[in-house]
Amino acid sequence: MHKPGDVILGGLFEVHYTSVFPELTFTSEPSQLRCQGFDPPGFRHAMTMAFAIDEINKNTNLLPNVTLGYSMYDNCATLVIGFSAAFSLASGREAQFLLQETCLGTPPVLGIVGDSFSTFSIATSDVIGLFKLPIVSYFATCSCLSDRQRFPSFFRTIPSDAFQVHAMIQILKRFGWTWAGLLISDDDYGLHVARSFQSDMAQSDGGCLAYTEILPWGDNPDELRRIVEVMKKSTARVVIVFAHQIHMIQLMEEVVRQNVTGLQWMASEAWTAAAVLQTPDLMPYLGGTLGIAIRRGEISGLRDFLLQTRPDLEDNNNKGKSMVNQFWEYTFQCRFAPAPAGWVEAGGALCTGQEKLENVETEFLDVSNLRPEYNIYKAVYALAYALDDLLHCDPGRGPFSGDTCATLQRLEPWQLMHYLEKVNFTTPFGDQVSFDENGDALAIYDIMNWIWFPDGRTKVQTVGVVKKSLFKGEELTLHEDKIFWNFDSKQPPRSVCSDSCAPGTRMARKKGEAECCFDCIPCSEGKITNETDSLECTNCPEDFWSSSQNDHCVPKRMEFLSYHEPLGICLTTASLLGTFICAVVLVIFICHRSTPMVRANNSELSFLLLVSLKFCFLCSLLFIGHPRPWTCQLRHAAFGISFVLCISCILVKTMVVLAVFRASKPGGEASLKWFGSVQQRGTVLVLTSVQAAICTAWLVSASPAPHKNTQYHSDKIVYECVVGSTVCFAVLLGYIGLLAVLSFLLAFLARNLPDNFNEAKLITFSMLIFCSVWVAFVPAYVNSPGKYADAVEVFAILASSFGLLVALFGPKCYIILLRPERNTKKAIMGRGNTK
C-alpha cells in the first residue's frame, strides 16, 4: 500500500500469517513467493497507520504545509519477506521510488513503523541501524532490543519484556506466589524472557522457578506430553507462559487430554487476548487466567475511516493484488476479474467493488479492543512530532555541526532520529509518550483476567494497570475484588515450595534445591527473629533473653534469695524463731538471775552470749533479699563480728572454768586474779576488736558489692554479692575457726572436772557441732551457684547458732523451769547426792 507525500513513512505489518516458497533457482523471481492466510487484524493494523497519517495531514497544528505519505509492506510472518521489505523501504528499489539521477531530495522513507516480531526486528535493525534509519516497533518486546550499541536507531512504543517480567514478578509478590513454573517459546522472545526471569527474581527476592520448559515449534506430541507431566508432578500451582498463540493451542490440547486442573495460568501479552483459547472446552482449565496485555486505547474516528476502505478496481492483475483488494476478496468471498480459472464455473462470485462493508460482520471493523493499533497510532505520531520539532528549528541554533538545522529538502534519517530521542507528547487518551536512553517508551500494561460465567460465556476484563512514570517509578494497581478465581474456594491459590518461616524461626536451605525450598529451624536460646523468612537469628542484649516463642527479647529474670520464695521464707522464719528463743532464754535468765544455776554459769557472760547469738540469728537476714551495696558490705562484717563475739564469750567461759578448777587445788588461788570480771570483759573486747579490724580492712581495701552474674544461667541474671577480696573473707572465717577450735580444745580438757553440772561438757558438745557445721560449709559454699551459696551460708549460720543455743542453754533452761529442785548450790556442787 502506497500513498505519496512530502515525507514518506514506511510500515511493516503481518497481513498474511503464512507463505509458500517455490523451489528456488537462479532464475526464480521474488514475485513467485506467495503469501497465504489473510489476517483481518493484521490488515487493520496497516489501516491504523494510514488513518494516523491521514489524521496528521488534516491537523493544522502538526506539520503544517507538510504532507505525510506512506509505503506499507506485508511481511507474511516470514523473516526473509519482512527483511526484503525493510530493504526495499530503505533503498527505494521499487520503480515508483527511484531517485533522480542527481541523487538529490529526501530518501525513500525517513522512518519505519514495525516490525511486529522480535526476531524480525532484530534482523532488520542489525542492518538498517547502520544507516541510522529510525525504526519504531509496535509489537517487538524482546529486552535484547534495548541494547543501544547494537540497535542505535531502534525505538518502540510497546514495553520491553524486561518490564513485562517486572510486572509479572510484582503480581507474584502481591499474592505471595514464590513457587512458579515458566514455559517459553523457542525463539528470542522466550529465551530472553527466561534469562530475565532468573536474574530479576533473584534480585527482587520475588521467588523461584520450579521449572523452565521450552515449548517446541511444530507438531511434537512427545515433548508436549513430557512438559505436561512435569507440570503435573510439580508442587507449583502457578504457570507463567511467554509464548505465542500457536504454542498455547498445542499445549492446551495435551493439558485437556491429561486433564490437568487446579493451575493458575499467567499469560504474556502474546496470548492474553487470544479469542481462539476462550472456548467452552478450554475455559475449565484457563478460567481465571491473569495476563499482561498491551495498553488498550481509544482512537476516535478509526471505525469511520475503516468503513471508507474501497478496492482499487484498476489493480486486478494476476501478478499480485493490493492489500485492499485481497481484503475485499477475503471479506466478501469473491474474486476480481480476471478471476482464477474455474472460479465462475464453480459458482464463485465476481467482486464489483460496490459491496457494502458495513453490511458484513468482520473482525476488521472491531475497534472495541484496540491494543496493537494503539501502539501503531503512538508510533506514527512519535515520528510526526519528531519531524515537527525538526522543522521548527531556529536557524543558527540547531543541534547539528555549526549550530545548523536540518531542512526538508536535504533531510537525513539520522537527523530525524536525533529529534525522535527527545520527543515527548500526550495522546488524546491521556498517555504520555517519550523514549528513554534505550529507545523504550514509558512502559504501561493492562492486567487482564479471564472470567468464565456459569452459562458458558467468557469475558476478558481489565483488573489493573502496571506502569512506569518519570517520577514515581513502577506502579502496580490491582483491583483484587474484581478478579475471578477458577477454584472452589474463589480465593487465590497458594503456590510456595515451603511455607514462610514464622517469627522465632530461621530459614535453612535444603541442599541441592531452589532457594525457595527450605526448613524452618527454631532460633536457639538467647536468639530471636521478629520477621518472617529470616535467614539469621540475632542475639539478645546481655541483660535480655529470648521469649518462649523466640520472637522478641524479654528482660532476664533476676535471681536472688528472696523473702517471697519458699526457701527464703523458711530461712527467715528460722532466723526469727532463733532470735525469739534467744530473747525468751534471756528473759528466763534475767528472771532467775539470783538462782545458783545462773550465778554459777557466769551470768554476765551468759547474758552477753545470748545477745551475741541473737545478733548471729539476725545477721542471717542480711543474706536474704535484693542485694544492695549496704547489705553486701554489712552482711559479712555483721556475721564475722557477731560470731567472734559469741565464740569469745564461750572461750572466756571455758577459761574461767579451768581457772576455777585450778584455784580449787592447793596454791592455785593466784590464777583467779587473771580472770576477774574486768579481765573477762577485756578479753572478749580484744578478741572481737581483732575481727572488727579485719572487717574494716576488708571494707576499705576491697569492699563487697552487688554483681549481676550471667555465668551460672544464660536465661537469668543471678544477683549476688561478690566478696571483693577472697583473702579477707578467708581470714575472717579463719579467725572464727581459730577461736572455735581453741574453745573446743580447752573445753575438751575440762570435760571431766568433778562438778555435778560441768559446763565444759556442754561447751565441748556445742563447739563440736559448731566446727562440724562450718567444716561442711566450706565445700558446700564453694560448689553452690548463685542464691544457693547465700542459702548455704545462712543455713550454716542458723545451724551453728541453734547448736550453740540448744547445747549451752537447753539443759540449763530445763533445770530452771522443770527441775527446780536441782537448782541449788548443793546440787550444782555435787554434794546433794552421794552417788
Image (cartoon, rainbow, N blue to C red):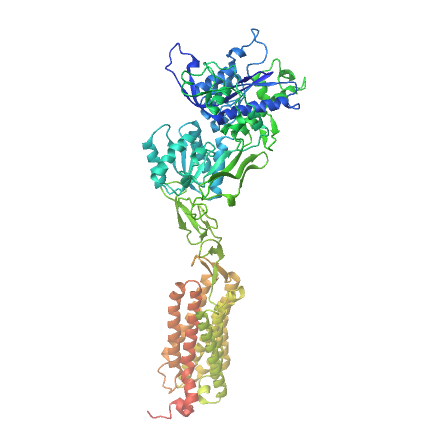
592, above or below 377, in the image: below
> Where's residue 412, x and y in %?
58, 16
672, above or below 527, in the image: below
Location of residue 407 by image quarter: top right
> Where's residue 74, x and y in %?
48, 20
Task: Please tell me which residue lies in front, 221 or 407.
Answer: 221
Task: Please tell me which residue lies in front, 722 or 561.
Answer: 561
Q: Residue furthest top?
A: 101
Task: Please tell me which residue lies in front, 181 or 655.
Answer: 181
699, above or below 339, in the image: below
Whether residue 676 is visible to the viewer of this picture, yes or no, is: no
> Where's residue 60, x and y in %?
66, 23
49, above or below 298, in the image: above
Whether residue 598 is visible to the viewer of this picture, yes or no, is: yes
Instruction: Give the quarter of the figure containing the C terminus.
Output: bottom left
> Where's residue 253, x and y in %?
37, 35
Instruction: Please tell me how many numbered marks the rendered image carries.
Output: 0
